[in-house]
């Protein structure tokens, strides 16, 4: 090693941003590896950097013994006192300096490669330690190149990858463009250092608002929830801890300057900002903006809401390809079924008619059941009378209503099956009559009397099997009134 080693170590330390002690350790390890190649792996060799002379010194460690059995690791007491240490005692370990000039060119080349690898590893570890605590932080870099639609971004000391799935659709960058993105993940493995960026994460949207809105950065205004479809639309629900601060106004800024800065960074992505509320139905109404909501029906068990909007607002509430309602669902966390007024009214009429058709139920009970979420006699028949709870209906009355619904549904099913059987029999009879007529009349004129007679026989048989069939088809109101 040359006397300039001090300067080399200092230069590498500054250039790579690595602690000087790490570089010294790498150089010592390099020389130790080269020495083992030169002198053999069985010898106990130690390498030390001497800053006074700017060199790496190699020492062989040997144990002082009176009778040597292994000359590779032991030295005779007399020889130790004569050559190395006059005060040496049996059992001591002494350091014998080795001549580095005897190391060959191949060993030196291997040592150089070892040093380069150590410095690279140290640099990666240093950069990993710098970035590992910066997840969910926005960084700025230069587009370096593209690899299979993945973007490689130069962050200065290292490179990061912006995968295709983390890029905003239809967003285009060229080599040399400056780009901002969120650090999604940082990983150090045997393959090397990996820093993954994202521009599609909802956290990226929230961090952009944090940079643009001082009230969010200071903690006065909070982003309680956000949802986005990158490149299309986003919704942000905000809340203010200070009653004097309007959370929506703070995020929008004077003449919309703050929100426009975020929109520009996201290449025109539309952003709806709504005030947060703990009233989940009200939150859903706000999340569906700009559409107006007429009524919300909540199903706590299914964690779902039926949202009724005016017919002329239906397309607005659903949004292009369902985008608006999807974002409202993600923002609120509730399953949403959006319907127009006319469709909801038609379904309500059908539901009430189905419930009223149950014999003995009465209009009041039918309305109570409808208000509690029962939409048909079939749905009511599947209810468990043991756990049935509807305000205004006693347990005993509830049991009667459910049993009546089951009887009605079963009777309806039986009648439908008998009608189907009768229709099938009628078709068979008609086919048989036509075939008979065809055989008797070569010109193909079917005798109408034969067909009518066959049909009459089948209908009589069907009515005999189901005497109440004729009333059952439209007995809903009659049974309800009885």
Image (cartoon, rainbow, N blue to C red):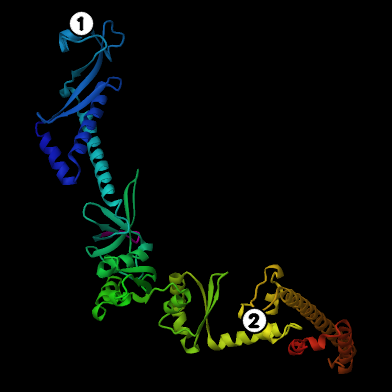
Instruction: Using a 10 Å C-alpha cutoff, classify the residue at mark 1 as few (fewer than 14 neighbours), some (14 to 19) or many (20 or more).
Output: some
Q: Nearer the viewer, mark 1 or mark 2?
A: 2
CA distance for labels 1 and 2: 110 Å
Instruction: Residue 474: give x, y in percent of width and height.
Output: 75, 89
The N terminus appears in which quarter of the rendering?
top left
Residue segment shown in magenta: 144-151
Instruction: Identify the disc placed on residue 368.
Output: 2
Q: Is residue 14 visible?
A: yes
Instruction: Using a 10 Å C-alpha cutoff, classify the residue at mark 2 as few (fewer than 14 neighbours), some (14 to 19) or many (20 or more).
Output: some
Instruction: Residue 341: give x, y in percent of width and height.
Output: 53, 87
Residue 184 is one of the magenta-drawn residues: no
Q: Secondary structure at mark 2?
A: helix
Instruction: Residue 168: give x, y in percent of width and height.
Output: 35, 68
Image: 382 above or below 99: below
Residue bearing mark 1: 78
Camera-side residue of 347 and 110: 347
Camera-side residue of 201 and 449: 201
Left/right placement of residue 20 relative to residue 243 reads: left
Image: 363 above or below 71: below
Residue 148 is one of the magenta-drawn residues: yes
> Which comes sooner in the sequence, label 1 or label 2?
1
Image: 87 above or below 238: above
Quarter location, residue 290? bottom left
């Amino acid at each position: 090693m040359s006397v300039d080693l001090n300067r080399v170590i200092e230069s590498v330390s500054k250039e790579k941003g690595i602690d000087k002690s790490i570089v010294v350790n790498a150089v010592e390890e390099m020389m130790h590896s080269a020495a083992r190649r030169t002198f053999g792996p069985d010898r106990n060799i130690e390498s030390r950097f001497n800053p006074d002379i700017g060199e790496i010194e190699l020492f062989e460690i040997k144990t002082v013994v009176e009778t040597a059995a292994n000359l590779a690791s032991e030295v005779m007491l007399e020889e130790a006192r004569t050559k190395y240490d006059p005060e040496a005692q049996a059992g001591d370990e002494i350091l014998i300096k080795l001549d580095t000039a005897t190391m060959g060119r191949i060993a030196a080349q291997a040592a150089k490669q070892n040093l380069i690898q150590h410095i690279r590893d140290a640099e990666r570890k240093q950069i990993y330690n710098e970035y590992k605590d910066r997840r969910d932080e926005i960084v700025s870099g230069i587009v370096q190149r593209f690899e299979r639609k993945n973007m490689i971004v130069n962050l200065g000391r290292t490179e990061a990858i912006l995968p295709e799935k983390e890029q905003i659709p239809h967003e285009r960058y060229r080599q040399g463009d400056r780009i901002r993105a969120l650090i999604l993940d940082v990983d150090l493995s045997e393959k090397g250092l990996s820093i993954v960026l994202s521009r599609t994460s909802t956290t990226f949207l929230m961090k952009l608002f944090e940079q643009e809105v001082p009230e969010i950065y200071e903690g006065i205004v909070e982003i309680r929830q956000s949802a986005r479809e990158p490149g299309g639309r986003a919704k942000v629900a905000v809340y203010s801890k200070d009653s004097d601060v309007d959370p929506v106004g703070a995020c929008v800024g004077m003449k919309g300057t703050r929100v426009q800065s975020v929109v520009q960074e996201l290449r025109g992505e539309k952003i709806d900002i709504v005030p947060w509320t703990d009233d989940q139905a009200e939150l859903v109404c706000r999340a569906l903006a700009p559409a107006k909501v007429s009524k919300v029906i909540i199903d706590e068990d299914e964690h779902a809401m039926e949202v009724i909007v005016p017919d002329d607002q239906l397309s607005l509430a659903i949004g292009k390809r369902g985008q608006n309602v999807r974002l409202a669902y993600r923002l609120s966390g509730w399953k949403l079924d959006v319907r127009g007024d006319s469709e909801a009214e038609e379904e309500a009429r059908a539901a009430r008619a189905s419930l009223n058709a149950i014999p003995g139920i009465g209009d009041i009970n039918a309305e109570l059941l409808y208000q509690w979420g029962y939409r048909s006699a079939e749905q009511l028949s599947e209810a468990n009378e043991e756990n049935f709870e509807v305000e205004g209906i006693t347990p005993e009355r509830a049991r009667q209503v459910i049993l009546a619904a089951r009887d009605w549904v079963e009777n309806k099913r039986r009648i439908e099956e008998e009608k189907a059987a009768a229709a099938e029999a009628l078709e068979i009879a008609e086919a048989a009559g036509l075939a008979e007529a065809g055989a008797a009349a070569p010109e193909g004129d079917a005798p109408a009397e034969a067909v009518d007679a066959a049909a009459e026989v089948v209908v009589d048989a069907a009515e005999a099997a189901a005497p109440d069939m004729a009333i059952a088809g439209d007995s809903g109101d009659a049974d309800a009134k009885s």
